[in-house]
Each structure stands twice: as C-alpha cells, then as structure tokens.
Image: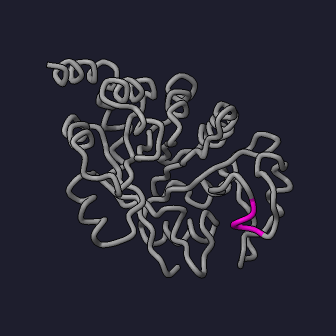
C-alpha cells in the first residue's frame, strides 16, 4: 500500500517531463569535463572541443567568481588544477581568466565562452558545484550565461536546492538532480528520501554508477524519468549502466 501511495504522489510531486525538454539527454553519451587526460586539461576549451568533434555531449562543472560570473572549473579551490591557491569565489572573473590550467597555455574559461565553443553542436550538461550558503549566487550566474544560449543545455547538482531554484527562477532550463550514496538523499530512508526528492523538483536524475542497479532508479525509469549514470570509466560499469539507465556520463583516459 505505501508504494502505491508514493506512486500516486510521484505523478503529482515528481511528474514525467515533456519529452521535448529532456529528449536530448539520452541521445548521446556525455564526456565528463570534456575529453581530457594527459594532454588536455579537464573543463578546458580544448577538452570540450575534442568532445564536440567526436560527437559526444559535454558535461562540465562550474563555480562562480567574486563578481558573480560562472566559470568552468570543478574544485572550489585553485590548488589541484593550477599553480595558484585559494578559493575560486574569492577572485574576480578577470583574475580567474588570467590563471593557466596546469600543463597548458589555457586559462580558466567562463561558462559563456565554453558554450560559444560548443555553439549548439551537441548537448551540454552543467553541473553546479554548489556550496552551502551560496546556492542562489551560483544559480544566478549560470542562468545568466545559459538563458541566451540557443543550444541544448541542462543543469544539475548534488545539491537539491539547485534544481528547486531553477524550477522557480529559471524554469525554461532543464534541471536534474544527482544521486549518490554520499549525497544528502542517501542519508534519508523510505518516505523521507522520497519527500526530499519531491522537494528538489528535478526533471531527470543522474545516479552514481557505483550505486547501480537500484529498484528506485528502475521504477523512475519505467515511469519515463530520464536516468543518466555517472561517471562511467570501465567496460564493466558501461554494462551496468546499459541495463539500468538511459545514457552515460563517461571518462576516457588517454586524452
């Protein structure tokens, strides 16, 4: 009986999205941070261009600058990917745009610059690396960059307030929720987990491939919710994803 009730509430609180809004998410695999590796830096213009040229979608990460612009960079700090240190959000866009990525002549790109590289040729998924207390600032920065873009672009995050924010303040942009055993939703059980998902108001789900398969994912997929797997990096994981999801976000070492 409880499952039937939750199924009924799913139709109301977590409705199946219009296929015209989400169909592109299942069309092609997405290269995580572009096709990167030893030669091409992650989230760089060159890595994104390589993914586009090979016919893949692109999944990128974003942070926001001190002056409120979205920059394509995974970490909250500069240390791992550059010769500099410190918090990304404590530097201006001008300063970030002058910092080189390790081993390259490239600098940290703004989101609108990466979208210009893609130029509508392939779908883009933007992962918002949201920090508690700064969610709305990052969402505003991303919306500003995407709202004039003519290509196919979606947003997603492990932080449930991100898709919830876009549902209210950027509803034209397709929004998703990432799920992992380390996410806030994994800490909830039963009804509370489902209620947390309803609160987030996503239109698609991206699930950690290490957590697949799950009855939850299969049920949502059967309903018509697009399910993506992240981050697939082996043939074994690709096989699991093929049975449990509609598309993959992958990494291919060697680039």
- Percent of width and height locating residue 8: 21, 19
In which quadrant of the rendered view does residue 30 lie?
bottom left
Say which residue appears at 47% left-offset and 77% top-offset: 253
Extreme-left residue of the structure:
1
- Percent of width and height locating residue 103: 71, 79
Say which residue appears at 37% left-offset and 42% top-offset: 205
On screen, 84 above or below 214?
below
Q: Indicate the quadrant containing the N terminus: top left, top right, bottom left or bottom right.
A: top left
Residue 92 colored in magenta in the image: no
Left or right for 113, reference 180: right
Front residue of 33 and 83: 83
Q: How is the image coloured?
A: one colour
Say which residue appears at 25% left-offset and 46% top-offset: 214
Say which residue appears at 53% left-offset and 37% top-offset: 159
Front residue of 193 and 223: 193
Q: Is residue 155 visible?
A: no
Residue segment shown in magenta = 78-82
Q: Is residue 91 visible?
A: yes
- Percent of width and height locating residue 59: 50, 56
Left or right for 74, reference 223: right
Total marks placed:
0
Left or right for 97, reference 126: right
Magenta span: helix, strand or loop, mainly? loop
On screen, 90 above or below 12?
below
Front residue of 216 and 226: 216
- Percent of width and height locating residue 228: 35, 50
Front residue of 186 and 202: 186
């Amino acid at each position: 009986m409880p499952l039937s009730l939750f199924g009924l509430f799913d139709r109301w609180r977590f409705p199946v999205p219009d296929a015209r809004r989400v169909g592109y998410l299942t069309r092609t695999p997405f290269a995580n941070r572009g096709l990167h590796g030893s030669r091409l830096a992650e989230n760089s213009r060159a890595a994104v261009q390589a993914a586009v040229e090979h016919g893949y979608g692109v999944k990128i990460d974003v942070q926001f600058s001190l002056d409120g612009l979205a920059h394509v960079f995974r970490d909250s700090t500069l240390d791992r990917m550059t010769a500099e240190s410190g918090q990304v959000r404590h530097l201006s866009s001008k300063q970030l745009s002058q910092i080189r990525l390790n081993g390259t002549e490239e600098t940290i790109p703004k989101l609108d610059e990466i979208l210009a590289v893609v130029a509508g040729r392939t779908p883009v998924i933007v992962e918002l690396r949201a920090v508690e207390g700064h969610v709305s600032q990052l969402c505003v920065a991303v919306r500003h960059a995407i709202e004039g873009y003519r290509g196919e672009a979606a947003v997603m995050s492990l932080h449930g307030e991100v898709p919830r924010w876009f549902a209210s303040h950027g509803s034209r942009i397709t929004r998703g929720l990432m799920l992992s055993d380390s996410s806030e939703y994994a800490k909830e059980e039963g009804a509370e987990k489902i209620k947390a998902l309803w609160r987030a108001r996503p239109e698609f789900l991206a699930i950690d491939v290490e957590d697949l398969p799950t009855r939850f994912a299969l049920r949502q997929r059967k309903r018509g919710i697009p399910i993506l797997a992240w981050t697939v990096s082996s043939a074994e994981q690709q096989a699991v994803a093929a049975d449990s999801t509609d598309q993959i976000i992958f990494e291919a070492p060697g680039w």
